[in-house]
Image (spheres, rainbow, N blue to C red):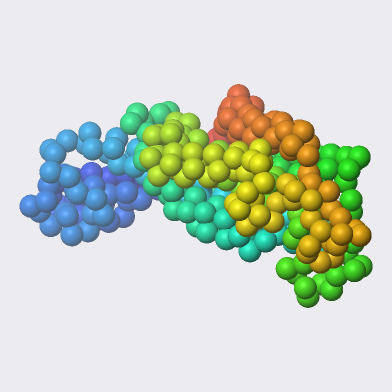
Amino acid sequence: VEGLMAQGLITSMSGDGGNDSGALRTAHVGMALSSATSATVVAPFTTNQPSVAPLVGLLREGRGALATSFAGYKYCVHYGLLNSTFKFIVVYFGVCESMSASYLQDLVGFLSFSWALSLSRPAKILGNDRPTSSLFSLMTVSSVVGMWVINTTFMLLAMHLTMSHEEYVPFPIREVRLTHWWKRSRNWEATTAFLMYTFQQFWSAVVFSFGRMFRESWYDNISMLVMASGGLGFMFYLIVAEPSAITRAFHLVYEPVDNYEPWSPEHTLPAMPRSHRRRLLAIVVANLVAVAVWEQAIVFGAVSRYLRERWRALSKHVTLRL
């Protein structure tokens, strides 16, 4: 066991007697084949089956747990990057979102989706590949940074579309103190940024839950399915809804605003037309599709497999030479 580990190999050991205790403790993964011997004291895993077949299940569980941990890690890192983009945009325009929007994004979007993402179960079949174990591997970095770049691009595209609309009225930031945040949430800029950012945040959790070969698909995770259906369904409703108490709670400008500072009857903010919101919805759908294609076809697809095979061949060559 020590000889195999000295060669840089991940080594597993299974045994059913006390004489196997040293090897079971030394190996990366030790599994005792009986619960009636002293081997169970030192082995981190135990099975009552007199066979090494449970190692397959152990590998499935381990790879699934590792893939799920990395999915949560990527979701948290991407959340921070995307939130930085969102904050930059709202600060640039001198606006902010409502408290209802913040609660929706943080309590539903981050806490709830993070919890649901962690409930993914391992794949039922053990594949030939294994998940990355590096926080800064090409696969991990390209998954997070690629999604962030795509989302930022579509966010800027949506803001440009809003600013180029013939009825767009810029928010008069010079007429409102920065400390009066409650006066800066009713405007076209905040409405557009909120809709795009929330869609992107919710969908990123779904994309990082894609099963591939190590975990079951996201729709097999009942908690994730419920969260995704409820969260995204609610956002689709918000973007096309008629003015109501719900849209007013999120300070969405779906009706003219003339009774909240800095807007007044002399300086009225026109309502965001439904036709414009349909264009935003088209951008949202394109955004969601682009992110899913990036994760499925590029990060975990043929391109990634080719690069991994090339890297492993080079790494094996260097190891043998050493």
Extreme residue toward the front, this view: 265
Residue at the image point whose x is 35% and y is 50% from the top: 28
In this rendering, would 17 be left or right of 14? left
Vertical position of residue 56 compared to residue 175: above or below: above
**Residue 61 visible in the snapshot:** yes
Q: Position of residue 145 (x, y in %)?
A: 69, 45
Determine which quarter of the picture holds residue 21: bottom left
Classify the position of the C terminus by image quarter: top right
Extreme residue toward the left, this view: 36
In this rendering, would 188 be left or right of 174? left
Depth check: give the residue in front, 299 or 112: 112
Residue at the image point whose x is 39% and y is 34% from the top: 220
Depth check: give the residue in front, 50 or 138: 138
Q: Position of residue 64 (x, y in %)?
A: 40, 41
How many numbered discs? 0
Residue at the image point whose x is 27% and y is 45% from the top: 13
Depth check: give the residue in front, 135 or 225: 225
Q: Position of residue 231 (x, y in %)?
A: 53, 45
Q: Position of residue 45 (x, y in %)?
A: 24, 50
**Residue 152 visible in the snapshot:** no
